[in-house]
Each structure stands twice: as C-alpha cells, then as structure tokens.
Amino acid sequence: MRVISHVVMGGLVAGFVVATTPLQAQQNERLAKAVAEMERLDALRSGLAATFEQTGAPADQAAFGQVCKPVGLAMQQGAKEHGWIARQVAVKFRNPANQADAEAVRLMQQFQRDTSLRGMMLRTTMDGRSGIRYVRRITVERSCLACHSEMNKRPEFIKQNYPLDRAFGFRAGELRGLYSVFIPDAGR
C-alpha cells in the first residue's frame, strides 16, 4: 500500500490511499473498520463514564465493572471477530498487561507533543507479522479522576487489586493512553 497522505479528523481517516492490488484494497477496508471500532469504543467509554459521574455512584469494583471493563471486553471481542491484535496501552498503566511497548511509547510521545492528534496509523511488524498499526488517543475525562487522580485518593479496590498501579496523577484533558490495533496484512 502506498500512502500518499493521511489525516485523522473527527475520528475518520481522510486521505489519499492508492490501492494497487485487491489485497491492498482489502487492507484499506480493514483499517477503516478498525478506526470506526476504536471511535465506537471511545464513545462507549465516554458515555459510560458520564453516566457514572451523573449518578454519583461511588468509585468501587461495581462501577469499574460497569465503566472500564465493558470497553476492554468489547475491544477484545472486536479483535477476535476481525483477526486483529487490540489492546489499550499506557506508560502509566494499572494492569501490567497494558504496559506500552517501545513503539507505543514513541507514539504516545507524539500524542503528548501534539494535543490535537487524535489517531495515527503506521506500517510495522508485530510478532513477526507485517501489517498496519492504528492507535487512537484516550483522553482523561473528569469522571476518570475518581480512580486516576492523586495516588492517595485511589479507591481501596484499586490499591488492593493493583499493587503495582502507575495509573494515577492525571488531570482532565491529559493523555491517558492509546487504543492500539494491529491489523495483519491480508492474505498472509
């Protein structure tokens, strides 16, 4: 695939992609699905977080199960359905399984430098397979601060379940992490 230009605006990939083969056209379609799915997941996260904030529910294990967990489960279901490798990644992670790999760390640095950057794609390899990686910003919302603000204000269930937690010290509007989707090349 030869990407002449790409921009991610308003959650949509806009640009000029020259597809020279049917396999490349299929890859473009798979990328568009991944972008749409990450936008759907972020809208789900934001909507669930807003509901949590509006109801005044306590930041406890039950709230986690109603706000954060459904997003992660939906991401894994989408990955399984489409043959992607998908996960949420962060430098300041709560779950060690979400620790950003070296490439994601570099990408996060770009997102931190350019706060208007919403998503980005690149050609890369993962686990020995070539493909496209799409990453999308996860922004801290005010409701996220119930669990992600100061270290000493974290809910008890987080302190107990995540003793190596690093996902605190955030302010609303900051970069929390990235949704990361790897789309293996079609037909390989």
Image (cartoon, helix red, strand yellow):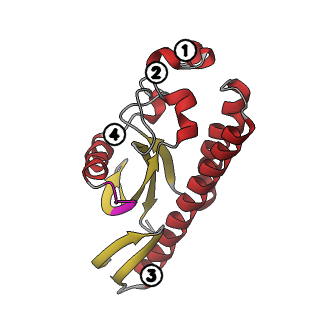
Q: Which residue is mark 1?
A: 159
Q: Which residue is mark 2?
A: 165
Which of the numbered marks, if any, corresponds to residue 101? 4
Which of the numbered marks, if any, corresponds to residue 25? 3
**At numbered mark 3, what does the secondary structure look like: helix, strand or loop?**
helix
**At numbered mark 1, what does the secondary structure look like: helix, strand or loop?**
helix
Mark closer to the observer (4, 2): 2
Q: Label 3 near label 2: C-beta < 8 Å?
A: no
**At numbered mark 4, what does the secondary structure look like: helix, strand or loop?**
loop
17 with respect to 182 (left or right) = left
Q: Label 2 near label 1: C-beta < 8 Å?
A: yes
Q: Label 2 near label 4: C-beta < 8 Å?
A: no
Give the residue type that dot 1 points to.
Lys
Give the mark nearer the N terminus: 4 vs 1: 4
Mark closer to the observer (4, 3): 4
Give the residue type that dot 2 points to.
Asp
